[in-house]
Amino acid sequence: MENTRPSLSDLQANARVVTLPMRVKFRGILHREALVFRGPAGWGEFSPFPEYGDPEAASWLAAGIEAAWEGYPEPVRTSVPVNGTVPAVGVEHVEKVLSRFGEVPAVKVKVAERGQSVAEDLARVAEVRRLLPHAGIRVDANGGWDEATAVDALEALAEAGLEYAEQPVAGIPGLRAVRLELQRRGIPVLIAADESVRRETDPLLVAREDAADVIIVKAAPLGGVRRALSVVAAAGLPAVVSSALDTSVGIRAGVALAASLPDLPYACGLGTLSLMEGDVTGEPLLPDGGALAVREVPVSEELLERYAAAPERQQWWLDRLARVHAQLASRTS
Ligand SMILES: O=C(O)CCC(=O)C1=CC=C[C@@H](O)[C@@H]1C(=O)O
Ligand SMILES: [Mg+2]
């Protein structure tokens, strides 16, 4: 992709930094910052979470460059099913959060939030089950449980009927141990790996180690749609496409990935614009009838201005862009 790699000044020429307000706290934040840039093939996004280091952020930049300089592969479907996403809110807020997604075939519920108990997780999941008796339910612990707590919690949660449990514990050995213990006890919960795919140097290790039944794939941390497609093909496990809490520009990449996968057995975690108050387009990629259309995203100059980040945050992102661009340039492939 050497000939499609833009120079730093190519990227800077059309780069914009936004701070988008969120409707509900997610990952502990109420504002999502993102840098978007325009290239010959359209808009791309560069929005690694602020705490991520430059080497990890390089894959996110590769994904943005793919979008803006190469475009996406041919889709094999015209829309992709999406799940609703329920952050670690109190039971009394679940209905309101769910209402923002409309009708969805599945719901992902965040669990194991720091400072909360398994009882609170069980109550949140039970409330989703009460409100949506027929939806698929999956939980995401973001590695927040230890092994013993994970097995006990999943035994209790299994009663709600889970599609899978995403990253119940941190790390590949832990995932493998929990998966084996669930099997040994006959607890019917599949294990999905998220951080153990996107934050490992080798995204295929978790599959080789037999540590998961399902992999979560995100276009930005995996270095773009084409790279994510090859990870899925090589892993040989069912894949769930999910968002990185992106603007509609980044969600478009997730949609392209989901639309190009030969098999799409699960609803995608790409409905997250329902958690956001602002976006860079007047036509956000929001779920409609439980699905997102595979379509382009017209970026709005007016919204780029309305949500423009404060000058010091713009500078922070532009400095980061320069450092990470240098990282990417120093890689051989
Ligand atoms: O998968 C979904 O339903 C929504 C996306 C989502 O949960 C996430 C997006 C971005 C960062 C992560 O903390 C989180 C995840 O862990 O999957
Ligand atoms: Mg996750």
Image (cartoon, rainbow, N blue to C red):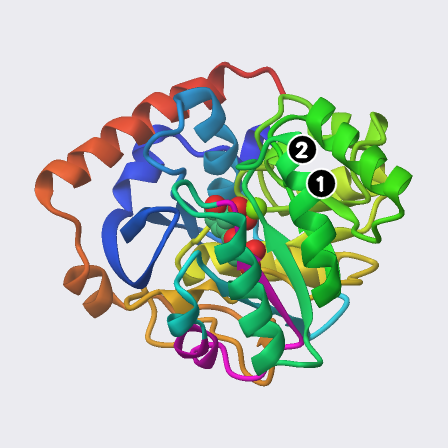
* Residue 170 on the magenta span: no
Q: CA distance from mark 2 to mark 1?
A: 5 Å
Given the image, on which type of amino acid does mark 2 rest?
Ala
How many other residues sit within 10 Å of disc 1, few (<14), some (14-19) or many (≥20)?
Answer: many
- Determine whether label 2 and label 1 are within 8 Å by CB: yes
Q: Which residues are magenta?
A: 95-112
Please report the residue visible at 57 percent of the width from the left and 36 percent of the height from the top.
145
> For numbered disc 1, what is the local secondary structure?
helix
User: Is 183 on the left or on the right of 243, as rendered?
Assistant: right
Residue 203, numbered circle: none
Task: Using the rendered view, name the quadrant where residue 198 is placed.
Answer: top right
Quarter containing the C terminus = top right
Please report the residue visible at 43 percent of the width from the left and 78 percent of the height from the top.
100
Residue at numbered disc 2: 148
Please report the residue visible at 53 percent of the width from the left and 37 percent of the height from the top.
144
- Please say if 300 is above or below 231: below
Please report the residue visible at 61 percent of the width from the left and 69 percent of the height from the top.
82
Viewer can see residue 114: yes
* Residue 99 on the magenta span: yes
> For numbered disc 2, what is the local secondary structure?
helix
User: Is 305 on the left or on the right of 117, as rendered?
Assistant: left
How many other residues sit within 10 Å of disc 2, few (<14), some (14-19) or many (≥20)?
Answer: few
Where residue 278 sits: x, y (%)?
28, 66
Residue 151, numbered circle: 1
Q: Residue furthest left?
A: 311
Q: Mark 2 and ligand 2: say if the CB distance to the nearest ligand atom is below 8 Å.
A: no
Where residue 227 sits: x, y (%)?
67, 38
Where residue 11 sits: x, y (%)?
34, 38
Given the image, on which type of amino acid does mark 1 rest?
Val
Where residue 60 sits: x, y (%)?
48, 37
